[in-house]
Image (cartoon, rainbow, N blue to C red):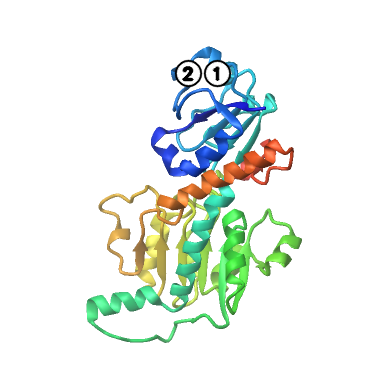
Amino acid sequence: MSIPALYLLDTEAFCEVFGAAEQQALAASFTFVTPGPVSALTTVAPADLARVEIIFSGWGVPVMDAAFLEKLPRLRTVFHAAGTVKTFVTPALWARGIRVTGAAQANAIPVAEFTLSQVIFALKHGWQRVAEVRTQRTFRKSDSTMPGICGSTVGLLSLGHTGRLVAERLRALDVRLLAYDPHVAPADTARLGVTLCSLDEIFSCADVVSCHTPLLPETTHLLRGAHFARMKPGATFINTARGAIVHEPELIAVLRARTDLCALLDVTDPEPPAPDSPLFTLPNVILTPHIAGSLGPECLRLGRMMVAEADRYRRSEPLIGEIFADQIPLLA
């Protein structure tokens, strides 16, 4: 029996995450009450909304508060083809017992791949060599503080979806893995092959520190100048999480004083930085425009995960991306 469903997300994002193959797969099991995606319930007839049991959402989905849910009396499950669900979930959603599953695990894959590439490049002081070639036409293979890959130390800040994937990929290298995460179980760290440390220890010992911490009230400006000042000579800081986790003025002050350090920032606060920000001109800062996450065809991975989740749902199997109310305070 086909289940009544609705695509509810930004219409431009729809084609990014649900390609022809994904739409065809879902059409075999679900009857969509509108011929295409909608970004607001006001464009759907009330009688059609009253039939909807499943929502396939993504970027741009409205907040699902009590007024929203009143229009969807039969809604049972939301399949969210994007990373965070915090932009739309509410207590009213959980009170109704509506299930939510998301594609955060799929969205973590390109971030982990990007991070792996930059950790390897940083351990070889690749960006330093690029700068020398460009500005000085000097072809120097190494310097006295270049850690290299063999026997170096990499520190991971947080072991959520992305941090765990990064750890799994780094295990293929001859590096020592440290991690800071006050919420992770020791058994998980043993499986991942990482050693738990304090923030101070991470910054003092690691040749590369990679941030994957969710932005929460307690993690805003978590990383201060004192942490960066502790870094080893020639060390690199990578941030693919959120810019506000870093106290940027203090980071900038340390980078000005410690020209041996390097910072690769895929995220900033604000994003992009103000036009007069020193981040644009400091020679030991590499800025990328938030490209670590899903882009272009990579976004289809999110839709494919929701297709797989929908198959599991129809077979009454556990949903691997399911999110519960008590997890929300710790999610990105």
Would you say residue 179 is visible in this rendering? Answer: yes
Q: Quadrant of residue 321?
A: top right
- 58 is higher (above) or lower (below) than 282: above
Question: Which quarter of the image is occupied by the N terminus?
Answer: top right
Residue bearing the label numbered 2? 44
Q: Left or right: where does residue 2 sit relative to residue 127?
A: right
Residue extending furthest top? 47
Residue 295 at least partly seen? no
Residue 169, percent across and down? 58, 68
Horizontal side of residue 183 vs 163, given as left or right: right
Q: Describe the element under mark 2 as helix, strand or loop.
A: loop
Mark pair 2, 1: CA separation: 7 Å
Residue at x 54% of width, y 32% of height: 88
Residue type, numbered disc 2: Val
- Please name the residue shown 57% across and 56% down the image: 162
Front residue of 191/26: it is 26
Where does label 1 land, which residue?
49
Q: Position of residue 18 (x, y in %)?
A: 48, 41
**Residue 98 coordinates in the image, percent (x, y):** 66, 29
Residue projecting furthest to the right: 187
**Number of labelled discs?**
2
Viewer-side residue, 296 vs 179: 296
- Circle 2 packing at 10 Å, graded few (<14), some (14-19), many (20+), is some
Q: Position of residue 29 (x, y in %)?
A: 61, 33
Do the residues under discs 2 and 1 have CB atoms within 8 angstroms?
yes
Q: Give the mark, 2 or 1, whose residue is nearer the N terminus.
A: 2
User: Badge 1 local density, few (<14 within 10 Å), some, or many (20+)?
Assistant: many
For label 1, the SS is helix
**Residue 188 badge:** none
Q: Amino acid at mark 1?
A: Leu
Residue under the point 68% across and 70% down = 193
